[in-house]
């Protein structure tokens, strides 16, 4: 009998949660317009730091090579993706088409982004991701070294890095949607041996699952 | 004296030589034989000639016979549907693939059709080594990617017959009575043809008549219904070449569809004249592996009919000397050269950069079109599996390690030497170490590089920097000349 009651309670709670979530999504839909006040839906610096700290420890669940003990992060958010890839990712459908173009992924392997994000969510992401932002040192982990240099001129000012590999990241301002449950970033990962640089760039979506950020999907945008 | 006899054993000609006695001893025998032969010939002319004609018939004739025989086995269908699905081979537009083991024939229908996506329909015959038809049917292919079907028609059809299907294409293989034979797709789902009146989602029974145009759908085994095309009655009568026909093509060329206006090129138009000249010299100087690769990108595939295209342009994004877009779009790979970072580069440095990125582009094609080189495709996929965190698809790490471990790095070194020879660097050609060191540019994250001694790593880096900057770098002098100064 107790089990039955627990099950009933769980069901009611689940229904309430779903109802709240739908209400929240509707609010976002209403907010999506050119006059959207993004500051209202922005999480604070600490929330961004928590996301970045976790992601760097997890290598964004994208990068194969281990990061060095110290990871260099460009202090200003990367805003160039809209200019560079904006035409390719105008709508959520563009993301879906790009996912589907991966010949190694079957439809069942593909992350169903359309079930998670609405078109309105995606337009909020686009707006947020191209905004300038200064990553804050006070809440980032000790292994993150904020830099104003690019990896090329960084080497000139740091004599000790010439003959070792360094990891250098350039990240767009994380775009949070659905009350901060999902985070979307553009990421440039560069690894340099002096000025000899290789790496890749990505668009990626993450989900906060009880405080743990986990990758939903990632799309490679450039390889070098 | 001898004579030659035709034998029809086992349906094949062969030649036999027999010895005869001298004529003076067997004059009577000759007369009798002569009479017998005349008699045999007159009685059995048809019996002899018929098999002769069959054996000498070309694959096209055999395919026609096969088609006519199979087409008579019509299924029972609504007359209107049957009429709209009936194909009319345009034999004059036939072409062969794979050493005449595959015959492709344009497949017309007497309808007016409009298609939702790129679409291609062909009658396809597969023949054995003796030109006997193994199987034949109607192959329909559809994709949302413009030009993909017509440009890659041959490889797609050959791949389909060999059980290799592109995930970008929806296939439908039917017999000549329009009955579905194979609707299995690359993603494991199967597809059936349906018309609007029969869709699960259609509840409008009032439309169940065949006076109007028909919307055709492809219905997937997971229930997904995808609109394919609309057919309307045509004014076509007997003439199967008339303009009233649907020629089974959408998203490409006209005519019978077999003379596709294929664009095969290495597009470097957006580069400066100097960079164009250098890259053209590089292409012209290659002799081994990169000659094959460049040839492929120029449409001169050695293995199969496959059109590779690449566009090289400038972009000052990122900090490397160049980057490659990891997605092939409309059969074009895109390479971006960092103009600023190469501003002081020597001609040899620029050539190395171009070859490095061309290898990326080549592997992207190998991945999307495995039939082009199955061995390399298998190796590439193994590297992608190895050099990725679970659930991710990072091609860069996989490519770079494959460059090194798959010996492509030796190809870069060898072709760089050929390029140097073309530019007149005669005294440099014996310096094998120089070309090997150059080939390592951009490969510092690979497992092999990381295992090198610090001394080796520093030598490679200094060489890289000297050629990239075109100036002495920490005691290392550049051996190439600054490009485009």
Image (cartoon, coloured by chain):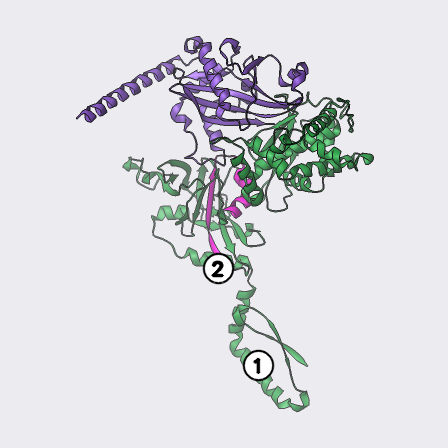
Chain colours: A purple, B green
Residue nearest the observer in this picture, A46 or B108: A46
Image quadrant where residue B297 sits: top right
Q: Is residue B136 magenta?
A: yes
For residue B65, which numbered disc appears in the image?
2
Residue nearest the observer in this picture, B345 or B397: B397
Residue nearest the observer in this picture, A124 or A90: A124
Residue B373 x %, y %? 58, 44
Extreme residue toward the right, this view: B427
Q: Quadrant of the C terminus of chain B?
A: top right
- The local secondary structure at tag 2 comes to helix
Q: Is residue B283 visible?
A: no
Residue located 59% across and 46% down the image: B304
Residue B56 x %, y %? 56, 64
Residue nearest the observer in this picture, B330 or B64: B330
Badge 2 and badge 1 in a common chain: yes
Residue located 68% across and 87% down the image: B22
Q: In the picture shown, does residue B63 fall above or below B398?
A: below
Give the CA distance from mark 2 to mark 1: 33 Å
Residue at label 1?
A: B38
Image quadrant where residue B374 sits: top right
Q: Position of B217 compared to B60: left or right?
A: left
N-terminal label among 2 and 1:
1
State the extent of the magenta-drawn residues as a range. B134-159
């Amino acid at each position: 009998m107790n089990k039955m009651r627990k099950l009933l309670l769980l069901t009611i709670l689940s229904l309430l949660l779903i109802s709240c979530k739908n209400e929240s999504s509707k609010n976002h839909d209403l907010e999506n317009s050119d006059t959207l006040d993004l500051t209202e839906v922005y999480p604070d610096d600490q929330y961004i730091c928590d996301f970045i700290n976790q992601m760097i420890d997890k290598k964004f669940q994208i990068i194969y090579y281990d990061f060095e003990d110290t990871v260099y992060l460009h202090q200003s958010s990367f805003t160039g993706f809209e200019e560079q890839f904006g035409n390719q990712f105008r709508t959520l459908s563009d993301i879906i088409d790009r996912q589907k173009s991966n010949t190694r992924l079957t439809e069942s392997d593909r992350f169903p982004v359309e079930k998670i994000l609405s078109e309105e969510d995606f337009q909020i992401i686009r707006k947020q991701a191209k905004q300038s932002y200064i990553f804050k040192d006070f809440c980032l982990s000790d292994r993150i070294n904020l830099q104003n240099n690019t990896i090329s001129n960084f080497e000139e000012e740091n004599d000790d890095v010439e003959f070792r590999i360094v990891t250098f990241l350039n990240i767009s301002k994380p775009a949070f949607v659905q009350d901060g449950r999902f985070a979307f970033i553009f990421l440039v990962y560069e690894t340099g041996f002096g000025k000899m640089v290789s790496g890749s760039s990505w668009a990626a979506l993450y989900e906060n699952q009880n405080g743990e950020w986990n990758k939903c999907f990632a799309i490679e945008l450039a390889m070098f | 004296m001898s004579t030659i006899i035709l034998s029809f054993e086992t349906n094949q000609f062969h030649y036999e030589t027999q010895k005869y006695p001298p004529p003076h001893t067997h004059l009577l025998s000759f007369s009798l034989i002569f009479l017998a032969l005349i008699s045999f010939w007159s009685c059995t002319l048809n019996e002899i000639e018929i098999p002769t004609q069959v054996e000498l018939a070309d694959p096209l004739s055999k395919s026609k016979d096969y088609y006519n025989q199979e087409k008579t086995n019509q299924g029972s269908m609504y007359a209107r549907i049957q009429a709209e699905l009936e194909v009319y081979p345009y034999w004059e537009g036939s072409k062969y693939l794979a050493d005449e083991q595959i015959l492709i024939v344009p497949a017309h229908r007497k309808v007016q059709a409009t298609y939702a996506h790129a679409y291609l329909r062909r009658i396809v015959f597969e023949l054995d080594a003796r030109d006997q038809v193994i199987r034949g049917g109607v192959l329909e292919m559809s994709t949302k990617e413009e030009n993909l079907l017509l440009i890659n028609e041959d490889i797609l059809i050959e791949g389909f017959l060999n059980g290799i299907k592109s995930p970008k294409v929806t296939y439908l293989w039917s017999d000549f009575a329009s009955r579905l034979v194979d609707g299995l797709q690359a993603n494991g789902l199967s597809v059936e043809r349906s018309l609007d009146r029969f869709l699960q989602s259609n509840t409008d029974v009032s439309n169940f008549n065949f006076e109007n145009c028909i919307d055709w759908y492809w219905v997937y085994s997971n229930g997904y219904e995808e609109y394919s095309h609309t057919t309307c009655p045509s004014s076509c009568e007997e003439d199967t070449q008339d303009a009233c026909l649907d020629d089974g093509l959408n998203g490409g060329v006209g005519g019978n569809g077999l003379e596709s206006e294929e664009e095969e090129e290495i597009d470097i138009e957006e580069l400066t004249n100097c960079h164009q000249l250098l890259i053209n010299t590089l292409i012209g100087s290659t002799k081994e592996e990169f000659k094959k690769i460049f040839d492929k990108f120029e449409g001169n595939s050695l293995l199969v009919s496959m059109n590779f295209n690449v566009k090289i342009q400038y972009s000052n994004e990122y900090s490397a000397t160049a980057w490659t877009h990891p997605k092939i779009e409309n059969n074009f790979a895109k390479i971006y050269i960092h103009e600023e970072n190469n501003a002081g580069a020597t001609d040899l440095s620029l050539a190395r950069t171009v070859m490095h990125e061309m290898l990326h582009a080549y592997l992207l094609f190998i991945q999307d079109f495995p039939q082009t080189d199955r061995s390399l495709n298998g190796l590439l996929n193994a590297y992608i599996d190895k050099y990725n965190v679970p659930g991710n698809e990072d091609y860069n790490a996989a490519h770079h390690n494959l460059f090194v471990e798959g010996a492509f790095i030796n190809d870069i070194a060898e072709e760089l030497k050929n390029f140097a020879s073309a530019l007149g660097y005669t005294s440099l050609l014996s310096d094998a170490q120089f070309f090997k060191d150059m080939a390592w540019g951009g490969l510092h994250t690979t497992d092999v590089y990381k295992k090198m001694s610090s001394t080796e790593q520093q030598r490679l880096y200094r060489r890289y920097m000297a050629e990239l900057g075109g100036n002495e770098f920490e005691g290392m002098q550049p051996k190439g000349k600054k490009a485009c100064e």
